[in-house]
Amino acid sequence: MSDSVSRVAVLGANGGIGRRLLPRLATAGYDPIGVVRSEDQVERIREAGAEPRLGDLEETFAPALDGADAVVFTAGSGGGTGWDKTLMVDLWGAKRAVDAAAQEGADRFVMISSRGADNPQAGRAPLRPYLVAKHFADRYLRQSGLAETILRPTRLTEAEGTGRVATTDGDAIPRADVAQAVVACLQDEATVGRAIELYGGDTPIADALRP
Ligand SMILES: NC(=O)c1ccc[n+]([C@@H]2O[C@H](COP(=O)([O-])OP(=O)(O)OC[C@H]3O[C@@H](n4cnc5c(N)ncnc54)[C@H](OP(=O)(O)O)[C@@H]3O)[C@@H](O)[C@H]2O)c1
């Protein structure tokens, strides 16, 4: 665990990756804060070993980052919403999350981006607007001056984690392994300033993330 990071705020804490990330952060010795947008989700966050706080990326959420040393953005508008939410959550919400982290003094940031966000034009046509949102959110983070790592997973699955990934090519990846990769990033300063693709694979996560 990095000496400078203790409290880690997770935006999107009730999501597929977020729910798997909270207990892994606690096990690794961090003090997780789970930011959710509904009172109904609070108990679940507490059960996952995190301090629940309310915040909505389309409204107010910066106060929920108070005291955090690091912020993880793993929120997403999801495939079932329109392009309005792609803009307001995946792009503008992520941009505001970077600003809020800086404002609240959290200088470590891990962004869950997406494979293909480096070059949206090369993506499948229906995915391009989403990839454009991710692309510019990543660029904004990169230029923020925060100690940042961008993770770009390929298609996510609900399968059990394997503890192993690949970073150049491979299969769909379990959300659990992306969650474990977030923890590994926080533990390894060599991941700062890098954008790393993630696939299902055979290399132990910490080794795969090393430059
Ligand atoms: N699905 C894929 O194959 C894929 C591939 C590559 C990258 N990604 C990216 O991976 C990340 C996590 O994916 P996932 O499958 O874990 O996502 P998920 O299960 O859909 O969870 C997304 C979370 O974001 C939250 N959220 C949405 N709008 C919000 C708002 N306005 N304010 C606060 N929270 C909000 C949702 O809250 P509620 O629980 O209240 O709805 C949900 O908990 C996302 O950034 C996604 O774009 C996904």
Image: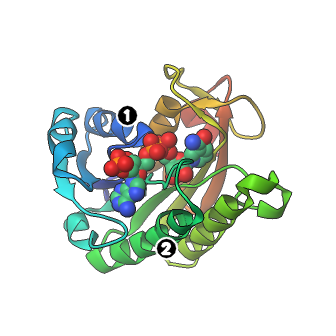
Q: Quadrant of residue 29?
A: top left
- Could you tell me how far apart the alpha carbons at marks 1 and 2 are, in whole angstroms? 25 Å
Q: Residue at x 20, y 59 (%)?
A: 54
Q: Residue at x 57, y 78 (%)?
A: 143
Expressed as whole percent of the image width and height from the top left, the position of residue 122 reads 85, 57
Neighbours of disc 1 within 10 Å: few (<14), some (14-19), many (20+): many
Res 67 visible: yes
Q: Residue at x 53, y 68 (%)?
A: 84
Expressed as whole percent of the image width and height from the top left, the position of residue 149 reads 54, 58
Q: Which residue is identified by label 1?
A: 20
**Numbered tag placed on residue 29 in the rendering:** none
Res 6 visible: no
Q: What residue type is disc 1 on?
A: Arg
In the displayed structure, 173 sits above or below 209; it is: above
Q: Quadrant of residue 120?
A: bottom right
Q: Which residue is identified by label 2?
A: 92
In the displayed structure, 204 sits above or below 74; it is: above
Expressed as whole percent of the image width and height from the top left, the position of residue 177 reads 52, 31
Q: Residue at x 17, y 33 (%)?
A: 47
Q: What residue type is disc 2 on?
A: Trp
